[in-house]
Image: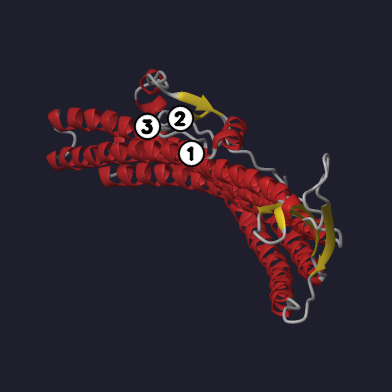
Amino acid sequence: MCVRWVSIAAVVAGIVLFAPPGRAQGEVRVSLEDALRAARRAAPDLLVARARESVAHAEVGIAGTYPNPTVAVGTTTQTAALTSDVSLPLVVLGQRGAAVDAARADEETVALDTQVTWNDVRQATARAYAALWLAEGVATARRESAAIQATLESAVVQRVQVGSAPEIDALRVHAEKLRADADVLAATAEVNAAATELGRWMGLSDGSGLRASADPPAPDHAPPLADLLAQVDEGAPVRREMSDVRASEAHVARERALVRPTMALDLGADFWDYTLSQVQPPPPGYTPPVNFRAQLTVEVPIFNQRGAYIDREQAAGDVARARVRAAHVQGAAELTAAYQTFEAAAAQQHTLADSVVPAASGAARATEEAYRLGRAQLVAVLDAERALVDARVAALQAEAARAAAWADVEHAVGAP
């Protein structure tokens, strides 16, 4: 909800003095939806996470790779003139399937890592957008305050020149005008800094020209806290840790499968030298005999039962289960804190926008009118103007805090 005020400048110098300036060259107006769309496409953290998904997908293929066969060729001087052997590894006792299952479980975990990263990027983008909107609102308020101070300074100088006000009033109002101008410069720099921060999440190296095109979205009334707490376990952070538990269980199954013996089928042939034949000289057309060999080699898992490997993966599973509990507690605590912050900021914003700002605006107008009639001191006018600007900025800050708190609520829930 955008807070709008009736500017005191309309009373002092007319609406024309505070007509909104034209859009500066190079500015780009974006909504939060635009920023989130760009962040999902080009946020640096997401690009890295998606690259990791490609690596995890390749790991599945690696886990299913069969070992290469071995070929040997040799010769001897007393027996066969030529011998050849082929050894074919046999991975037939479930080792390959268990390795592929473990790699796929890791791939699912990496995919959920990407969702967790997007959850963080979305929160950061929403917060950066709210900060940019706040900086723009504060800059606008500061510019209007500076214009008011300029108009007030002109009026005071005229009163001093005709002798209806002391000369010290001109010095005071000039000092206040200089202070207002300095505030405008600082607020403008804050806008550029906030725009650059938003651009970083959108994948831009220079986002200083970005400007918010709409108010940061946040509901007027949040759903019940109990309903939101029920969604924490369905969020990406908790689901990621649960996936890691399943991956640890798949790793245990893989290590247990590797305990099973590996086998190899060896095939060979010996081509004999005819000169070694007992028939001398060999008759015409004599062909030396060929000796074919075959054997099955079976690993005997005596010295290595992979017990330490299994214990390690089981311990990793215990760590993953502990992280599930920690993610649930952290998500619930973050959600509760963000929910309370949202409600407090919403109540503050409504109070400031509906009561404090109108009252400060009315007080400023009344004080200025009293000064014109000689019934109030200039310092009262300056204090009233400063109080009005502070109230407007406070209302903007409360609205930005409400939007940022809602971004934290969505982050804690882990909605897609």
Q: Nearer the viewer, residue 251 or 192?
A: 251
Where residue 181 appears, x then y in whole percent? 26, 36
The residue where tag 1 is placed is 198
The residue where tag 3 is placed is 144
Disc number for residue 210: 2
**Mark 3 or mark 2, which has the lower sequence index?**
3
Residue type for callout 2: Leu
Residues at badges 2 and 1 in contact (C-beta under 8 Å)? yes
In the rendered image, the vertical position of residue 12 relative to residue 2, given as above or below: above
The C terminus appears in which quarter of the rendering? top right
Where residue 314 appears, x then y in whole percent? 74, 75
Q: Residue at x 40, y 47 (%)?
A: 387
The residue carrying pointer 1 sits among few (fewer than 14), some (14 to 19) or many (20 or more) residues within 10 Å by Cα, namely many
Q: Residue at x 67, y 46 (%)?
A: 58
The N terminus appears in which quarter of the rendering? top right
Q: What is the total number of numbered labels drawn onto the structure image?
A: 3
Q: Is residue 359 left or right of residue 164?
A: right
The residue carrying pointer 3 sits among few (fewer than 14), some (14 to 19) or many (20 or more) residues within 10 Å by Cα, namely many
Q: Residue furthest front?
A: 281
Q: Is residue 295 left or right of residue 75?
A: right
Residue type for callout 3: Glu
Quadrant housing residue 213: top right
Residue type for callout 1: Leu
Q: Residue furthest bottom?
A: 303
Q: Nearer the viewer, residue 181 or 107?
A: 107
In the rendered image, the vertical position of residue 6 relative to residue 367, given as above or below: above
